[in-house]
Image: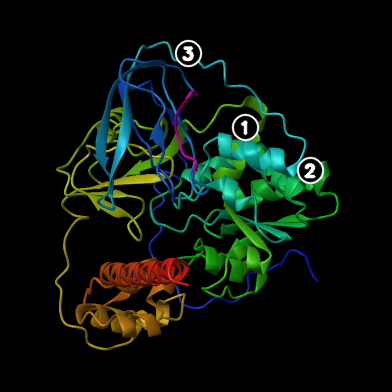
Amino acid sequence: MNLSIPLNPFRTFGGAKVPHRKHTASSASEVMPLPEKVRIPMQMHIGAPCKPLVKVGDQVLVGQKIGDSDAFISAPVHATISGKVTAIEKMVMTDGKSVDAVVIASDGENTVSPDVRPPEVHSREDFVKAIRESGLVGLGGGGFPTHVKVNPPVPVDTLLINAAECEPYITADHREMLENADRVIDGMFTVAKYLDIKRIIIGIEGNKPDAIRLMKEKLAADERNKNGMAGVLTLRAIYPQGAERVLIQAATGKQLNPAKLPADMGCIVMNVTTAGFISDYLKTGMPLITKRVTIDGSAVATPKNVIVPIGTGLEDVVAFCGGYRDEVREILLGGPMMGIAIPSDDFQIMKQSNGILFFGKKEAIKKRLTACIHCGTCVTVCPMHLEPYALEQNFEKRITERLRKLAVMTCIECGSCSYVCPANRPLVHSIRLGKGLVRKEDAEEKAREEALKAKTEAAIEAVEAESKENP
């Protein structure tokens, strides 16, 4: 098996040439003063929500665990400031689900919990356990619990560090490399050590030459890289290079079957900031309580990269950035390609927040929607080889059988199709709703099967009971 570092990325399909608009690339991260309160939702990850471990009136300390779950796919939640729990209330998330949120009023002391101490890690099992206790999830926006990712069911040989950051505006990961290159490199070598990984590839888009240069210099000087197991791969600056399947193909040449996981291809894909956090956590024991977030958009007075306690309200973050200079017409959690619009700044910074965009009148202009002209442009840019126009049409007709045949669940919702559509069709929105139809049908079918199984088992038990009574 050839585990050398590729000199150039392998060819990938599709992608859109989006404007980068990295206005804050040269803006060093600024630590925001403590907010007066935080509201911390019990679900900031893919998987099961946590249950609050505190009650109203409790005094909590920084780093104290305040939420947890017995579910395998979940991640604990910690207090990000010290103070008093003033409420446990319901918070509506971007997917419409309501989850518990712990509200903490700051005491201004920011006292650290005595439970915060470096974990003892001597084995892979210790490492996985420590990562779970840290509350770490994918910090690139996905929010998948990292302890599950670093415990793959099959051996892997390649760690892919995702530093593409291909969304316009967002520069948080770029700043992580420039400001914390040493901890990023230490984190990725630590992961490789405990998972017995033989190759590390850092994928960075070519529009970040300063980060590429710095990471190469750091790797060349690192004693752990004497055998050249780690290297930097300069990716084409075309969206969505940071998508997991696209990055795997660009770095290894392997196409990821939609039915398989990256581990099945011998890979683990990890965000660059996630790798950096692992290094810090193993040294300090401080769980995931802060997040670097890019604040940008024409409505914000001073766009910045800001490090804030998780659970901080968006209104507080905007105030730290000088407030609004224009009427806010649109707020996006994330970048303009995959970001989710929210109705107001009455929302919180989450673990997976990497960018919040506040658009004014000019940027939020709505384009005129027309009928599909069947040009096929959406097909040419889809990195998953799908037919977005057909997926939209079959969603509108509610034909779930066709949606399945067209592989609707394969869509990574990157937004390339919507971006290039000359008719301005809401393709990604329709595909998301189409996925919902398929999931609903699957759930109903599963419920029918379970009901039939239960009915059959009950009938068998009744027959057996009758046979015993009347042999």
Question: Whole-Å distance between the Cαs marked 1 and 3?
Answer: 19 Å
In the picture of the structure, the residue carrying the numbered disc 1 is 280
Above or below: residue 148 compared with residue 322: below
Mark 1 in CB contact with mark 3 (< 8 angstroms): no
**Residue sitting at 56 percent across and 34 percent down?**
134
Above or below: residue 425 compared with residue 22: below
What amino acid is at disc 2?
Ala
Q: Secondary structure at mark 1?
A: helix
Q: Secondary structure at mark 3?
A: loop
Q: Tell me residue 5's x, y (percent).
A: 74, 63
**Residue sitting at 63 percent across and 36 percent down?**
130
In the picture of the structure, the residue carrying the numbered disc 3 is 111
Above or below: residue 347 compared with residue 421: above
Q: Is residue 335 left or right of residue 290?
A: left
Highlighted range, magenta? 63-70
N-term mark: 1 or 3: 3
Q: Tell me residue 404's x, y (percent).
A: 37, 80
What amino acid is at disc 1?
Asp
On residue 245, the disc is: none
Quadrant in the picture for residue 407: bottom left
Q: Is residue 422 left or right of residue 49?
A: left
**Residue sitting at 56 percent across and 60 percent down?**
206
Quadrant in the picture for residue 27: top left
In the picture of the structure, the residue carrying the numbered disc 2 is 221
